Image: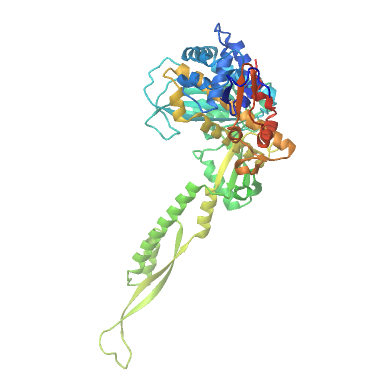
Amino acid sequence: MDIPGGYKDIESFDVRHAPIISAFCDKINLSSIIDKALDTKMDVSPGKIVKGLVLNTLAGRDPLYRVEDFFSHQDTGLVVGKGIGASDFTDDNIGRVLDRIYSYGTQKLFCELSLEAVKKFNIDTTQIHHDTTSVSVWGDYLNKDGPFEINHGHSKDKRPDLAQFVLSLLCVEKDIPIETRIYSGNEDDKTISRAILSRISSYMAKYEIDSEGYIYTGDCSMVTGDNLAFMGGLDNPEVKFISRMPATFGVVGTLVSEAVSKNMWTDIGILSEEKKGESAYYRSYEKEVSIEGRTYRAVVIHSDFYDRRRKKKIDKETRKDLEKAKKIKKKLTSTKYFCKKDAEVAAEKEKLPKYHRLKTDIEEKKIYKKGRPKNGKKEVAAVRYILRCDIIPDDKLIEDLKEEAGCFVLISNVAASQHSARDILKIYKEQHGIEKNFGFLKDPLIVNDLFLKKTERIEALGFILVISLLIWRLAERCMRKYIKEKAITITGWDKKQTDRPTTFMMSTKFCSVHILKKGGMRWLPRKISSVQKEYLDALGLGEEIFYTAVD
């Protein structure tokens, strides 16, 4: 191609997947919504500052003081927008935007953006998932007047030595975040669940969904007497819910034992869409239960993939029980009894092992007089009795225990006429989407590099991370929806075809993309590859995103 002025002053930028992220930010009008909401008097657009922080986060998450340096090596006009340069990403500008976000309200601003995402991508909001996690941090945090306190509490990171805060996330379609909040590090999950339940109806009304139009799914911490009363039973559900019933409810053990002993399971089958040969096979047993005068639906779920930790515990207990049985056997068989009754009493007095039975027989042992026998026949001096024992494992009991180890109980106030046991389990298992999101959000090293000592800044930076998560998940959702609708596959890892691409997988396919720029003109030094074209089609984008700047 002809380049005005020749090849002098041509710049090269390693843009990788940044234009794709930028395009998805634009799809939900990120910059314009933030500009309208914050309405600052800054010379630079706060919406574009936030967009830049999202781009930086999804390119590797630099600490704030290096964001300006990051954009000094980027085509900022292309990926962020016209009229903004690297020098606009100073600590002062970023700090002012973060402070303004906090003042406006991080939850309020995120709600506005998630509403736009739900509308633009036609996201299903009928199934809501909630969970919390703790995020550990280092250092001293003395800000007692902030929105929350960083202190010690129950650490889900298994780092009780570190201070922490608690991150709460509300998602739809498994992993699309629609609300996030930060709580003090010692906040109890039960209290957080109650707070969520108290506002969930009014929050979902913003999405034009009434209480009959959604099902709320949370972890077992939400299942308390007060929360169950608030949500209502089968006959009067105020908030339709699904959760796992904690073992602190005595009825859990009773239900599991009953399901195993009756062996009247209903087959559910395999739910996982990945690695069918290695996936769990599920069965269910249903029963209505009464808790504090209200009726709920209890579904006992059995998986042929036993809970490994519990199965290991049972194996350890059975080995220990066998050693106990051997000691009892040795004690009983090494003793000689003067009469048969004594032997019987001794066997009955022993405390029998739990997982093994002792099958005992009494054997008569004659003691002969010393000396030469008269008439060639030995004369009996006395008779003693000894016990012969065989150790027999109680296979039925052990097998039942192992089967019970693969069981858990789901509780719900959703009628069977509305959702089957399979539906209930499938909805509950989609909780793993939030767990994946926490892996994205709570990297302690990243939190330390980014988060400052002021809790207000931590909350605002948490907003940036969750916005980044939203964009990341929207891109993944877009690809998978396209592939499902077209009934096709796409090139995944190791050139193998896949129908479940991830955004990270996509990002690796564009790691070699550079653009050349001279003045206001941009071009690709080499053509987009066929694999990259596959991904762009799945994302609903064209290659022009790599050389056409947006306003």
Q: How is the image coloured?
A: rainbow
Residue at x 49%, y 60% (from the top left corner): 394
| Residue 186 in view in this figure | no
Q: Is residue 444 left or right of residue 264?
A: left
Q: Count the labels in the image.
A: 0
**Vertically, is 148 above or below 394?**
above
- Residue at position x 65%, y 47% in the image: 269
In the depicted structure, whether residue 1 falls above or below residue 268: above
User: Does 80 sit above or below residue 223?
Assistant: above
Q: Is residue 64 left or right of residue 498?
A: left
Q: Position of residue 218 (x, y in %)?
A: 57, 32
Who's the residue at 53% across and 22% down the image? Answer: 73
Which residue is outermost to the right?
A: 486
On the rendered image, what quadrant is the C terminus found in? top right
Image quadrant containing the N terminus: top right
Q: Nearer the viewer, residue 91 or 116?
A: 91
Q: Front-most of 36 and 72?
A: 72
x%, y% of residue 278?
Answer: 59, 49
Q: Report x, y in % for residue 233.
A: 62, 32
Residue 281: percent from the left, percent from the top?
Answer: 62, 48
